[in-house]
Amino acid sequence: MARNKKKFSKKKKIVITVLSIVGIIILSVGLWAWNIWRNVYSPISEEKLDETKEITYDVVDGITNILLIGTDERNLEENSRSDSMIIATLDANKQEIRLTSLFRDTLVKIPGHGEAKLNAAYAYGGHELLMKTIETNFGIKLDKYVAINFWGFEKVIDQIGGIELDIKQSEINELNKFIGESTGGATSPKVTEPGVQKLDGQQALSYARIRKNDTAYNRDSRQRTVLFKLAEKFKDVNPIKYPFLLNAMKNEIKTNITPDLMFSMGYTIYKFPELNIRQLAMPLMDEKTGVSAFEGRLYKNLGWVILTDLPQMGNLLKQFIYEGKTPTLNDVDYSTLKSVLADFKTDENRYNAEHGINPEDHVTDEDKEKENITTPGEKPQQKPVEPEKPSTPTQPTEPENPVEPEKPVEPEKPVEPEKPVEPEKPVEPEKPVEPEKPTDPSNHGGNTGEKPGAGNNDIIVERP
C-alpha cells in the first residue's frame, strides 16, 4: 500500500513538472508574442473626428474589410502621404478574398481639411483620418487596418522565401533602376531577362513601385499582383508561425487587429479549399482601351488629380465588397458622370479666378510624369462615348471594293474565240479550181489570145 502511494506520488511529481515546463513555455511564448504585438498594435481612437457627420454603413456578417496602407516613412509614428491604399475584403461566406486598390490621386473631401488628394489624409491624420476619409467618400465601412512601410514590405517577402512574378521585357529597366532605392542601398541582384522568376524583397518592392513604364493604373495593378502572390504564400503558412513573422518586422508595421482576431482570420483563410482572389481598381478604368470613369488633369492648386463621381463609384464598390459582383464600365451612368465633371470645371474656373491661380504653376515632377501618361484625348467626357466606336464596323463596309469581282466578268475575253473564226482562210480551197487550165489542150488551134505556151512547142517540135 505504501509502495503504491509512493509510485503515485512519483507520477504526480512528473506530471506536475511536465505541466509546469509546458506552462512556462506557453507563458514565455505568450509574453513574447504580446511584446511583439505591443509594438505593432495601434488601436483607433473612439473620439469622433471634427466635421464628420454620422453615417450609416452597410455591414454584412462574414465580411471583414481591412485597409492596407503602404508608406515610405521609416518611422510609422511620423505620418507622410500614403504610397498605396488597398482594401482587402475577407469574405468567409464565399470563401474568397477581394482586393480593391484606390487611386491615391483621387480628389476627395477630407474631414476637417476640405478638398485634397486621397493620400494626403494619411499625412494629415494617420490611419484614423485616412479610414474616415474613405468611409465618408465611398460610403463603406472599414473594420481594420494594417500600415506597413517599405522596409517591412521587403522583410515579409524575404521571410516567406520570395514570390514568383511574371516580368515583362518593358519592365526590366525600371525595375533594376530602383532596387534598394527606397530602403537605402541595393543588396539584391538585377533582373536580366523577362518571364516568371522568383524575386526577393528589394526586387519585389521595386517592381511594385515602377512608375515611368506605363500608367498609374498599371502601377496599382502591380501592387495588387504582389499582394496576391503574398496571400498565395501565406495560405500555406501555419497561423502559429505568424508571431515569428511579426517579430521580423515589428518596427515596420502597425495594426489594430488583435492577436486572437489575426489567428482567427489566418485560420479562416488557411481552411479555404482554394485561394480565390479577385481584384478591382477604383475609380473604374479599362487599361486595354483606356476608357475610364474619371478624368485625370491639373486642378486648381492641387496639381494632377483624378476627378470622378464618388457617390456612383461608392455604390459600385459596395456591390463588389458586399455582393461579390465585379462592376465594369457598362455599369457606369455616363450622363451623371459628365454632369459631375462639368460641375468640377465650373467650380475650378470660379476658384482660379477668385484666387488668381494658374494650375500650371503647381505642377510637380511627379505630375509631369502623369501628364505624359494622360493624353489630351483621354478625357472621360468624350471617351465614354467611345463605346460607340465598335459601331465603326462601317469600315468593314469596305467590302465594296471587293465588288471589283466585276473584273472576273472579264471571262468575256475568252469570247475572243472569234479569232479562230479565221478558219475562213482555209476557204482558199478555191485555188484548186485552177484545174481549168489543163482544159487548154482542146484549144490547139484556138485563138485564145495567149502566146502559144512554151510547153506546147517543146512537146511537138522535139519528137523524132
Image (cartoon, rainbow, N blue to C red):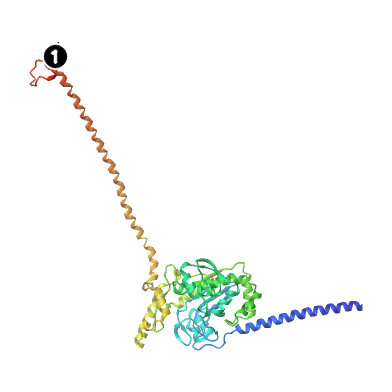
Residue type pointed to by label 1: Glu
Q: Position of residue 68 (x, y in %)?
A: 54, 78
Provide residue 291's location: percent of width, then percent of height. 42, 70
Q: Position of residue 61 (x, y in %)?
A: 59, 75
The quadrant in which residue 114 appears is bottom left
Q: Residue at x 10, y 19 (%)?
A: 452
Q: Looking at the image, how many numbered discs can be counted on the residues?
A: 1
Residue at position x 26%, y 36% in the image = 420
Q: Residue at x 18, y 24 (%)?
A: 433
Residues 152 and 93: in front is: 152
Q: Is residue 72 above or below residue 444?
A: below
Along the line of sight, the residue nearer the viewer: 378 or 151: 151
Per the image, the residue denoted by label 1 is 462
- Check the image and report above or below for 394 versus 349: above
In the foreground, 210 or 90: 210
| Residue 141 visible in the shown view | no
| Residue 400 vertical position relative to residue 250 in the rendered view, above or below | above
Q: Find the residue positioned furthest to the top.
A: 464
Q: Does residue 89 appear in the picture of this structure?
A: yes
Point out the image quarter for the N terminus: bottom right
Residue 364 falls left or right of residue 64:
left
Q: In what element is the residue under mark 1?
A: loop
| Spot occupied by residue 357 in the image (x, y as percentages of width and height) | 36, 85
| In this picture, residue 396 sits left or right of residue 120 | left
Res 274 → quadrant: bottom right
